[in-house]
Image (cartoon, helix red, strand yellow):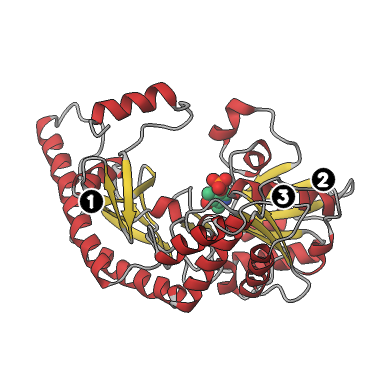
């Protein structure tokens, strides 16, 4: 199995071609480290795309999963279970919904956003057919959430989309122009993760709150990538001091167990009524027990503050890199986008992997970092060292390339 060609052939033969090439065959993890089938260790600064909040094989995660598996795994939503009620109460407290808030559980980010889409339709009825979301925002790949996702190239092969969704520019002027009394909801991704870790303009979320309130539309914040402490707040919207009508969460709350949730505030909590939505696995005892334990550990170990502090430290490291490739840092806490001056993000990812570091190319000019929230000085230092090596590898390749093919080269050299 450890033969490189062999596992890649298996991938090509047995797995659906909907995803691109796999970068490695990973067999084991511990903390911020993962190992491939040849025993090579990597520093994991992607954490399963902002999912493994506690890193790999954290004892709290392992214990909660094992204990619940040996107690009660699944009963369907004809019944309630203690872990489900505990997690709902915890999420309400951390999101600050107050007593009137409510939680719907699904199994993924897309399912959380599907529930939010249906919430928007229940609110809108026939009088409010319009749903707004932001150009370039990512909200999922199911047919409902794909309509919300503002990326025409993803939608095109699957047209026609679910009707009613309009994508607007991420400016306060565009918000002002688009909102009227026929809008049911506005979806906002507080940092556009998949688009390249793009921050919202200053004051955007407050303006969105003000305008949606004025026109009676719901403000739904997609915290699937930004939630669970990653940005140095429990949820990114809390930085702006606003109260949304709903948020969606997934990725980091389960720490590696698939779970998602829609959390409502105020009157939006009364929109769903019996029979309007459901999922066989949603809110099952395994997932909710693990998520509860993961969130409790984030709280007890002070990992939200750690995300803010390590994020600031990483930003300093990146700003201090003597590299002609790095242009700027975006994002917040431990969701960081490193903007590059040249479209070489994939080459940087490959070079980093060669040096034993896993990072992600969010697009051609952005390296995304989303390490576990548990990282400390050791991991920050190791990252600094490995990432600098990767950048140097790519820089020399670019220079060689430029020297060798001066007149036929099409890409701008460094
Ligand atoms: C990942 C993500 C989703 C989709 O979540 P899945 O679990 O992949 O379905 C939706 N919105 C945002 C902002 C995300 O980052």
For the residues labelled 3 and 1, the Cα–Cα distance comes to 40 Å
**Quadrant in the picture for residue 97:** bottom right
Numbered tag placed on residue 31 in the rendering: none
| SS for dot 3 | loop
Counting other residues with Cα less than 10 Å from the Cα at mark 3, is it few (<14), some (14-19), or many (20 or more)? some
The answer to whether marks 3 and 1 mark residues whose Cβ atoms lie closer than 8 Å is no
Q: Is residue 52 visible?
A: yes
Residue 275 left/right relative to 310: right
Counting other residues with Cα less than 10 Å from the Cα at mark 1, is it few (<14), some (14-19), or many (20 or more)? some
Q: Is residue 137 visible?
A: no
Numbered tag placed on residue 76 in the rendering: 3
For the residues labelled 1 and 2, the Cα–Cα distance comes to 52 Å
Q: Residue at x 41, y 70 (%)?
A: 307
Numbered tag placed on residue 41 in the rendering: 1
> Where does the C terminus fall, quadrant-wise?
top left
Q: Earlier in the sequence, mark 3 or mark 1?
A: 1
Viewer-nearest of labels 2 and 3? 3
> Where does the N terminus fall, quadrant-wise?
top left
Looking at the image, is 138 positioned above or below residue 302? above
Q: Position of residue 338 (x, y in %)?
A: 34, 56
Numbered tag placed on residue 129 in the rendering: 2
Which residue extends farthest top?
A: 13
Looking at the image, is 316 positioned above or below residue 182? below
Residue 129 left/right relative to 41: right
């Amino acid at each position: 199995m450890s033969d490189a060609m062999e596992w890649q052939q298996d991938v090509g033969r047995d797995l659906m071609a909907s995803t691109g090439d796999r970068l490695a065959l990973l067999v084991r993890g511990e903390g911020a480290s993962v190992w491939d089938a040849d025993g090579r260790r990597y520093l994991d600064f992607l954490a399963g795309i902002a999912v493994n909040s506690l890193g790999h094989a954290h004892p709290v995660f392992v214990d909660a999963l094992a204990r619940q598996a040996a107690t009660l795994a699944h009963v369907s939503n004809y019944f309630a279970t203690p872990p489900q009620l505990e997690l709902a109460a915890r999420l309400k407290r951390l999101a600050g919904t107050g007593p009137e808030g409510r939680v719907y559980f699904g199994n993924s980010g897309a399912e959380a956003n599907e529930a939010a889409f249906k919430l928007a339709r229940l609110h809108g009825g026939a009088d409010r057919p319009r749903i707004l979301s932001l150009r370039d925002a990512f909200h999922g790949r199911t047919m409902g959430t794909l309509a919300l996702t503002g990326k025409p190239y993803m939608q095109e092969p699957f047209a026609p989309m679910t009707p009613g969704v309009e994508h607007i520019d991420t400016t306060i002027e565009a918000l002002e122009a688009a909102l009227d009394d026929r809008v049911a909801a506005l979806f906002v991704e507080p940092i556009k993760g998949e688009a390249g870790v793009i921050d919202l303009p200053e004051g955007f979320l407050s303006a969105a709150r003000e305008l949606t309130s004025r026109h009676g539309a719901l403000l739904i914040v997609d915290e699937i990538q930004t939630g669970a402490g990653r940005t140095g707040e429990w949820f990114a919207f809390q930085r702006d001091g606003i109260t949304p009508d709903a948020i969606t969460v997934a990725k980091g709350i389960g720490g590696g167990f698939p779970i998602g949730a829609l959390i409502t505030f105020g009157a939006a909590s009364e929109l769903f009524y019996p029979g309007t939505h459901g999922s066989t696995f949603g809110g099952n005892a395994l997932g909710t027990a693990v998520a509860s334990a993961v969130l409790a550990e984030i709280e007890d170990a002070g990992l939200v503050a750690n995300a803010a502090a390590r994020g600031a430290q990483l930003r300093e490291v990146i700003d201090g890199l003597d590299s002609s490739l790095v242009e700027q840092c975006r994002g917040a806490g431990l969701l960081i986008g490193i903007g590059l001056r040249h479209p070489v993000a994939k080459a940087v990812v490959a070079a980093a992997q060669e040096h034993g570091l896993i990072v992600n190319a969010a697009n051609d000019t952005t390296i995304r970092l989303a390490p576990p929230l548990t990282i400390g000085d050791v991991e920050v230092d190791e990252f600094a060292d490995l990432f600098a090596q990767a950048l140097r590898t790519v820089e020399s390749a670019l220079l060689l390339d430029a020297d060798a093919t001066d007149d036929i080269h099409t890409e701008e050299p460094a």
